Image (cartoon, rainbow, N blue to C red):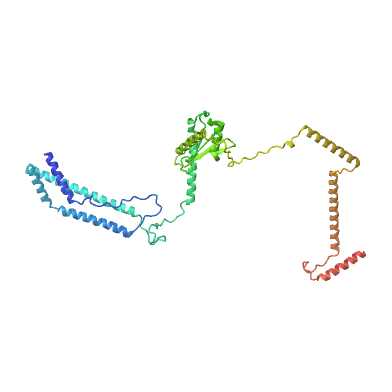
Amino acid sequence: MASAFSITRLNVLASASRRLSPLHGRPPGPVVGPRWLKTSASRWANTNRNERYSREEEEDDDSADADDDKTPELPKEELIKLQIEQLRSIGCEARESREIALQMMQEADEFSLELSAEDEEEKELDEQLRTVSLGPKPNKQSFWYDEDDPEMCTQEHDQFNEDDMTSMAHGKLDEVREMRHYARLIAWEMPLLSKFAKPFVLPKADQVLRWRYTTYMGELHPAQQKVVVQFAVDDMGLTPVQANKLRKLAGPRYDPTMDIIKMSCESFDFAAQNRRYLSDLIEKLVAEAKDPKDTFEDVPLDLRHKRIPSKPRFPLEWRLTDERRRQLAEQRKAAALTEDERIVQGTLIDGKREVDDFLARLDAADEAAKKGEEKGTEVDTQFPIPAMGGLGSGGKSSPTSSMDWMRAKSRSWSKR
């Protein structure tokens, strides 16, 4: 009985599902998620949008009509009768078969209601996806609307009410937050690194390569994959001939002042790859330097890439020897005798006395000049000179009359 009931239930559900609008027969709409990192608005093409979705709706209607043509809908009573006949043919009794048929029809109705509810949810989801894929509708009345550029964002922003900081102030605030974040790391996290400290150990004899890496504290930088290696030629365990050949092979990477070879590589994306390339290159250079076929002894070492500054040395002629000391002593003694003779003869010039005499003459000349100025002012007060035309504050006399007056006064002064 259980197997017959399950078979009949499946038949009824299949017939009911054929009467309902199918979920999977509809072609799916364009599922386009929002582009979060996009700087411009999505294209709003009304013509293409309406044509696409109208075409999809027509296809949905055609598929639903095709399903309806294939499975014509029958009345509920006739379906119950058909199910009862099928159950009677299996071997069920009339009463029992009617109860089973009614129960199956009730389950089919509940299933159809669930399908219709899911269909409504699917329509709402299609509408949401349609809105997201098309983007916001442009405002044709906006100042920024351009028919030739439908992707132009014309969304108007709210008016600034002077209740917020400027973008530059927000950028400065973000910078302060970042600095405080690193200050907290320095105060609380950096001291914890002391437990990972290791004592310094001198490199061993076989550790002749010194590697240098570049890091930017977790930030991406085009120079973070660069690796630099340097080594001393004498530490490679080579003979003098082989060491000279290695210096010549290194070319401009050889530093003659420190006798080291320095190379770098940033051709690969990762520092480990660049290190591997440099280590292989050093092995090839050493192997080539040890090759006895050609020792490059006839090739001179080219040091034009490194300008070695010449260190100035003290001239040998300037060194103070015993002979030079005796010569200087004789010259000083002769100069002292000559000075004593001039003192006795009175021909020696005393510089201090000459300076004092010169200053005394200057003081005397200043006093004489002051007395002359005072005498001149007294004469002017006794015999005032009338204002000459163009020179006085209000004079109206001509320059000729003024000069005649001066000549007359000078004659009277000379008679006195």
- 393 to 264, vertically: above or below: below
Outermost residue to the right: 415
Percent from the top left, x then y, of residue 34?
35, 50
Q: Is residue 230 left or right of residue 53?
A: right
**What residue is shown at x 26% (from left), y 50% (from top)?**
122
Can residue 188 be seen here? The reply is no
Percent from the top left, x then y, of residue 291?
51, 33
Towards the viewer: 393 or 372: 372
Percent from the top left, x then y, of residue 17?
18, 49
- 215 to 19, vertically: above or below: above
**What residue is shown at x 20% (from left), y 54% (from top)?**
64
- 75 to 326, vertically: above or below: below
Q: Is residue 313 left or right of residue 23?
A: right
**Total numbered badges shown on the rendered structure:** 0
Towards the viewer: 351 or 271: 271
Percent from the top left, x then y, of residue 327?
81, 35
**What residue is shown at x 13% (from left), y 44% (from top)?**
8
Can residue 186 be seen here? The reply is yes
Q: Is residue 378 left or right of residue 123?
A: right
**What residue is shown at x 17% (from left), y 50% (from top)?**
18
Q: Is residue 102 left or right of residue 169?
A: left
